[in-house]
Image (spheres, grey):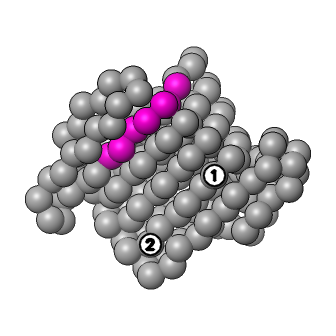
Amino acid sequence: MHLSAHSTVDTAERTNGHGVVVTRGQTLTITGDDGATLHASGVSRHFTVAEGAKLRLKSVVLTGGRALLSGGGSVLLLPGATLEAESVTFRGNRAVFGSGGAIACRGASLSLRGCRFEGNTASLRGGAISVISAAAAATAASHADAQMPDATRSTISVDGVSWEG
């Protein structure tokens, strides 16, 4: 899917609180031009990515996501899922009674390159990102890869990511 410059898509219109669900075997790729925005209107998260599914995001803004109880205000990655995000801004997303205001990663693979996290909040842990079942160490402008055995494995790669608020 390609979003043109300065376009806004309301992801809450077509979901039932779970956001767009990417199911096993599917790969969803969304690329945007300058200012392309996915807005969840504070009603739901943007995406839930299931085991064996992959979400690729490039040059988009994800804003207004909200998760109640489960975490992942913008994106919830279930065990075995994959998120690859490049030049993505996660802005103003929240996890109410949950962790990971922008992203909740539960035994999944997460790759972030040149992303920004602005004003995301969570009532429990990880205002921007919550990672469960992973051990990771990251430094600015370097990669961090962490792996856990089999069913509890998470892989995280971070490069050129900035955090605000």
Q: Quadrant of residue 114?
A: top right
State left or right for residue 86 relative to residue 60.
Answer: left
Mark carried by residue 58: 1
In the rendered image, which residue does mark 2 sit on?
A: 53
Q: Is residue 164 above or below residue 65?
A: above
Where, by quadrant of the figure, is residue 21 drawn? bottom right
Residue 53 sits above or below residue 66 on the image: below
Residue 35 is situated, as x and y percent measured from the top left of the image, at 81, 42
Q: Amino acid at mark 2?
A: Ala
Q: How many marks?
A: 2
Secondary structure of the residue carrying numbered label 1 = strand
Question: Residue drawn 72% across and 68% down?
Answer: 1
Instruction: Estimate the spatial distance between the alpha carbons at disc 1 and disc 2, rounded to whole Å.
Output: 17 Å
The residue located at (61%, 66%) in the rendering is: 29
**Left or right of 107, for residue 74:** right
Image position, residue 26 (x, y; %): 51, 78
In the image, is residue 159 part of the stretch drawn in magenta? yes
Write down the quadrant of residue 126 in the picture. Answer: top left
Q: Dot 1, how many residues are within 10 Å of its Cα: few (below 14), some (14-19), or many (20+)?
A: many
Q: Which mark is residue 124?
A: none
Q: Which residues are magenta?
A: 156-162
Residue type highlighted by circle 1: Lys
Furthest-bottom residue in this view: 25
